[in-house]
Amino acid sequence: MDYVLFVKGSGPHTIEYGHAADQPVKEVVVSRKCAEAVLRGAQVFVPGVLACSAHIEIGDTVAVSVAVEQPGSENKWSVGITRGTVLQGSPTDPYYHERSGLYIGQGITKLSRTGLFRASEGVAVEMTNRVFDLPSLHSLLEGDIFLQNLPSIITAHALDPQQGERILDMCAAPGGKTTAIAILMRDKGEVIATDRSHNKVLDIKKLVTEMDLHCITAFKLDALKAICKSNESIEFPPGHGNEETFSQTFDHSDICKSPDGNVEATTISHSDLTSEETAENKGDNGGKYLSKADIRKNIRRLRNGGGRNHSIGGRVEKSKGFSPSSFDRVLLDAPCSALGLRPRLFSGEESIESLRKHGKYQRKMFDQAVQLVRPGGVIVYSTCTINPGENEALVRYALDTYKFLSLAPQNPRIGGPGLVGRCELFDGEVVEEWLRPGEEELVQRFDPSSLLDTMGFFIAKFSVGQKDL
Ligand SMILES: C[S@@+](CC[C@H](N)C(=O)[O-])C[C@H]1O[C@@H](n2cnc3c(N)ncnc32)[C@H](O)[C@@H]1O
């Protein structure tokens, strides 16, 4: 099996914006969430409609646009329209609202303007044309194909995993890059996929099963505590990975085990119980013995409700971390401000302070990656943000802190150069340093406004020298 690769607008987060050619005059503006669904093949449903032109009748051909956040008062961003706003009256009309959404397609209205804002559900606009028709593949061919953004595929290739190697994917869920890595290794070797979230580890496991890959093991692990502190070893169950073929590469003795056994359903312990929860667990159960697992299950139900947690179910192995220098290659696809995801680009949810916090968090994770990779190994660092504080500034930190690291060329290289220079405030204070001349061509910065037309993304690849330098 191989990937079906959608270069444009692929993945659950991205949509392609269209241009204003041949748009009908009457317009319906929808929320971002609604627009994403529409571009995946859905109709416009009533709750997704934010605004529309005056005098819309049933059967009108309308342009459908997505509301775009604009800078508003007090440095806040907002879509600037409230549900029910009238668009495109005459410019002298006090309610005249300049078209400010991005065109995503057109369709036929199924309700009049009054109906659109009075009804609570139903189809508002039946789409006849979308600027980008992404085939609706959800629930179709499940397990046979997996959509990936182009930069994500490039990241897996940049890591250049080799058959028989031992790879760590530190922030792996839902497993897109993990599985791409395993496929590049022809499922031979060992890929360890970790994520902090129990449910997300289940997502990885589900994907791995669907893709019938055998060299991947998924663990719940906080990437900030990824170094093993004890010498306890774990026995792997038979059939795990490809030990038979590649046992000469590494044994598994460097994986630490939870003190109470190797299977953890959640991180919640008895001491986490509120008095209410404790009462429920001690309560009338018809004399039935409640095992620790039952208690945990109850707590989960109380905390999360009968949602996703329950529909998926399953056991997640919790790792205590790994020995230093125990991986050939480490991928750190770091949690980030996600300012490269369209249409989130300018969602206004981030502040200067929160962007700085992301940078600090990523540096701490990178410190762990440096310890885990062996001398002569490779680290790939990637984010889906365009914020240089989380990209070029991380590279600067890495190269200045760890003299044994050097930037390595990436193949393929289709992204643009990184940013050289520094971020300086008006008073001359240097906030962060970016790349130095000569380094920019060694990283890949995907600019969502460039002709390549991908999501915003950043990839840096480091070669690891002798650590005692
Ligand atoms: C950018 S996403 C990873 C996407 C994934 N690599 C893929 O290609 O499918 C970042 C992930 O980091 C995880 N994460 C955040 N903080 C973490 C931590 N301290 N330790 C481990 N994982 C963490 C999140 O749960 C999230 O799944």
Image (spheres, helix red, strand yellow):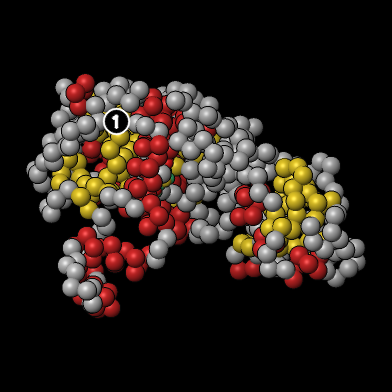
Residue shown at the point (38%, 64%) measured from the top left: 304
Q: Quadrant of residue 173?
A: top left
Quick check: 79 above or below 204?
below
Residue 218 visible from this viewpoint: yes
Left or right: residue 246 versus residue 176 is: left
Q: Quadrant of residue 167?
A: top left
Residue type at mark 1 is Cys
Quick check: 444 above or below 83?
above
The x and y percentages for residue 158 are 41, 27
Q: Quadrant of the N terminus?
A: top left
Q: Nearer the viewer, residue 420 or 191?
A: 191
Left or right: residue 301 versus residue 19 is: left
Q: Secondary structure at mark 1?
A: loop
The x and y percentages for residue 352 are 48, 58
The x and y percentages for residue 120 are 68, 68
Residue shown at the point (31%, 50%) measured from the top left: 314
Q: Quadrant of the C terminus?
A: top left
Q: Residues within 10 Å of mark 1 (few under 14, many from 20)?
A: many
Residue shown at the point (57%, 39%) measured from the top left: 137
Q: Which residue is mark 1?
A: 215
Q: Residue furthest left?
A: 231
Q: Residue furthest front?
A: 286
Residue shown at the point (27%, 45%) measured from the top left: 219
Q: Nearer the viewer, residue 68 or 350?
A: 68
Quick check: 327 above or below 71?
above
